[in-house]
Image (cartoon, rainbow, N blue to C red):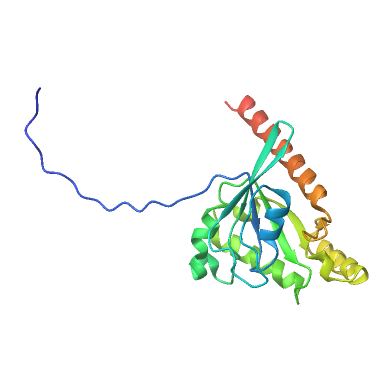
């Protein structure tokens, strides 16, 4: 019915960056057993293979317990200099910025478990955005591949170095899965209660 005189328009380039919304994120080196764990404890059906980089895009799964649910994200395996974009690592790391908890997966069959742990921590630290300060649950995966005596030595070594408890798991034998789920829900409840208190007492 009415129009004003047209004005010169503006042209801009806008880069959009997708960040998935998940409560918890799985991280670790390629082929650490993240996809197998996601498939074992959630309703997700990710591609699983006995070779690195079977996961090329983030995968989401949901864990339900009564009236609660947790969205779990499996991001592709991180490699050295992922924070610089190697292996498009910056895109992968961006997906866990909003996660409240990180499940750090260490392959029991790894040649150097401490180096595997350090490698991921270096990338989180270098990337920034508070990733290294997020609550982490340490998980030894593929426990079925290692003898019990040797596995106990690995657990003690990692716990001594990280000063954190470690959950031993096997997606194949369903070992440790209930403990992972219960620990995850416990930390999520604790985290939510903390957020409620902070909101209640914020000026």
| 6 shown above or below 10 | above
Residue 177 or 124: which is nearer the viewer?
Answer: 177
Residue 111 or 195: which is nearer the viewer?
Answer: 111
Q: Position of residue 70 (x, y in %)?
A: 66, 41
Q: Position of residue 4 (x, y in %)?
A: 8, 29
Toward which corner of the image does residue 173 lie, by quadrant? bottom right
Asked whether, in this view, residue 181 is left or right of residue 76, the answer is right
Quadrant placement of the N terminus: top left
| 39 shown above or below 23 | below
As drawn, the residue found furthest toward the left would be 5
Residue 201 or 29: which is nearer the viewer?
Answer: 29
| 41 shown above or below 93 | above
Q: Residue at x 85, y 71 (%)?
A: 146
Q: Residue at x 71, y 61 (%)?
A: 105
Toward which corner of the image does residue 78 lie, by quadrant? bottom right
Asked whether, in this view, residue 84 is left or right of residue 197, the answer is left
Quadrant placement of the C terminus: top right
Q: Position of residue 195 (x, y in %)?
A: 65, 34
């Amino acid at each position: 019915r009415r129009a004003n005189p047209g004005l010169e328009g503006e042209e801009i380039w806008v880069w959009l960056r997708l960040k998935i919304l998940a409560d918890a994120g799985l991280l670790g080196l390629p082929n650490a057993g993240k996809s197998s764990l996601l498939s074992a404890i959630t309703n997700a059906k990710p591609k699983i293979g006995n070779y690195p980089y079977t996961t090329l895009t983030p995968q989401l799964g949901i864990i339900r317990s009564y009236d609660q649910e947790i969205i779990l994200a499996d991001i592709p395996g991180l490699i050295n200099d992922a924070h610089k974009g190697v292996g498009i690592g910056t895109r992968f790391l961006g997906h866990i910025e909003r996660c409240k908890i990180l499940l750090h997966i260490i392959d029991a069959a790894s040649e150097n478990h401490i180096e595997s742990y350090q490698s991921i921590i270096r990338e989180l630290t270098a990337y920034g955005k508070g990733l290294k300060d997020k609550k982490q649950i340490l998980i030894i995966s593929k426990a079925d591949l290692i003898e019990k005596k040797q596995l106990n030595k690995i657990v003690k070594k990692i716990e001594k170095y990280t000063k954190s408890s470690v959950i031993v798991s096997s997606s194949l034998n369903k070992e440790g899965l209930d403990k992972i789920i219960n620990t995850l829900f416990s930390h999520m409840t604790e985290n939510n209660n903390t957020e409620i208190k902070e909101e209640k007492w914020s000026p």
